[in-house]
Amino acid sequence: MREREERFHVETTVFDEAVCIRAVGVVDVATVAAFRGALWAAPARPELRVDLSDLLMLSAAGVRALVAARLRVRAQGGELVLVNPSPMVERVLRATGLRRVIPVVAQAAPERLLAAV
């Protein structure tokens, strides 16, 4: 179990208008349940921002989790935004076409989030 904790973890920050989830490590078949759980546990807000800057790998299971999260967030009237994907994750987003479906931004727009605090 310790190995899984070292391979992947998430940090969630809740603001008035957004929830930020920072994924760290590797999302693969062994860790996707924790990733999906964090996405589902996020409280409903107009925006769910997933910071991918510290994600080393995103498997097909992780891509499916993001697609499902997008559908869920949109059903609640919100928007899913991917933030600053690492180079490896950026390649996955481009190869799968996910970049065309889910907005990707270069940074977490701190001025917007600080205004929401």
Image (tube, helix red, strand yellow):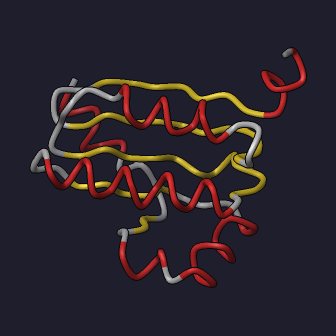
Q: Which residue shows up at 28% across the image and 32% down it?
A: 114
Residue with the most extreme top position: 2
Q: Is residue 1 above or below residue 54?
A: above
Quadrant into which the N terminus falls? top right
State left or right for residue 90 relative to residue 102.
right
State left or right for residue 83 relative to residue 70.
right
Q: Is residue 41 above or below residue 91?
A: above
Q: Position of residue 47 (x, y in %)?
A: 23, 46
Quadrant into which the C terminus falls? top left
Q: Position of residue 81 (x, y in %)?
A: 36, 57
Residue with the most extreme left position: 77
Q: Is residue 95 above or below residue 70?
A: below
Q: How many marks?
A: 0
Q: Which residue shows up at 47% across the image and 30% down it?
A: 38
State left or right for residue 26 relative to residue 100.
right
Q: Which residue shows up at 31% across the image and 54% down it?
A: 80
Residue with the most extreme right position: 3
Q: Position of residue 86 (x, y in %)?
A: 68, 61
Q: Position of residue 89 (x, y in %)?
A: 67, 65
Q: Which residue shows up at 54% across the image and 25% down it?
A: 11
